Amino acid sequence: MGTTTCLGLTATWPTTLASVMMSLWPTPRLSPAPHAFIGGFSVITRDALPYIKTVGDRSEAKTFGINTIGLQRKGISESSIEELKQVYRVLFRSKLNTRDALQHARQEKWTAPEVEVLLRFIETATRGFIR
């Protein structure tokens, strides 16, 4: 493992880009979600959702589906990835508002623990999240 210093921040490698970027962000700090994918040169001012690709600049940031490749590399099962894709469609591609979409998603019987992580993250978000 090596260390590097940039902008007064000392990081020990390997580390994730998200953790480096979050440590550079002024308070209040945003919550880094597990396996969130944030595109290069993106400026994130709300929480990025777990397992989801987020790209954009400030209020223009948007989600672009499940981070399928990253989840496969982490060893997440294909059935869990498929369930995440289905719940993503309910939450973000339906014409339901957030409350109704969450209620609809909670009525389904999901077996993947990652779906519960995503739903709980959305339900407990206090600073808002990127849609």
Image (spheres, rainbow, N blue to C red):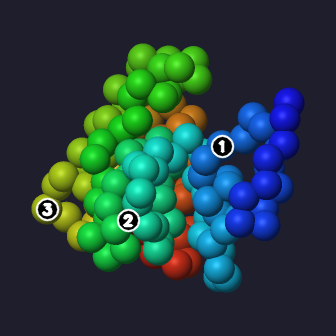
Between label 3 and label 2, give the one nearer the viewer: 2
Q: Position of residue 118 (x, y in %)?
A: 49, 50
Q: Position of residue 11 (x, y in %)?
A: 80, 50
Residue that lies at the very extreme toward the bottom in this rendered image: 27
Residue count near mark 2 (Cα–Cα under 10 Å), binned few <14, some 14–19, many ≥20: many
In the rendered image, which residue does mark 3 sit on?
95
Question: For the residue marked with disc 2, what is the amino acid?
Answer: Ile
Q: CA distance from mark 1 to mark 3?
A: 34 Å
Q: Position of residue 38 (x, y in %)?
A: 45, 50
User: Are the residues at dot 1 and dot 2 in contact (C-beta closer than 8 Å)?
Assistant: no
Q: Residue at x 32, y 76 (%)?
A: 59
Q: Residue at x 47, y 72 (%)?
A: 46
Name the N-terminal-most of marks 3 and 2: 3
Residue 97 vertical position relative to residue 102 in the rendered view, above or below: below
| Tag shown at residue 7 | none
**Image quarter (top left, top right, bottom left or bottom right) of the C terminus:** bottom left
| Tag shown at residue 16 | 1
Q: CA distance from mark 1 to mark 2?
A: 20 Å
Residue count near mark 1 (Cα–Cα under 10 Å), binned few <14, some 14–19, many ≥20: few
Question: For the residue marked with disc 3, what is the amino acid?
Answer: Lys
Q: Position of residue 54 (x, y in %)?
A: 38, 53
In the rendered image, which residue does mark 2 sit on?
130
SS label for mark 1? loop
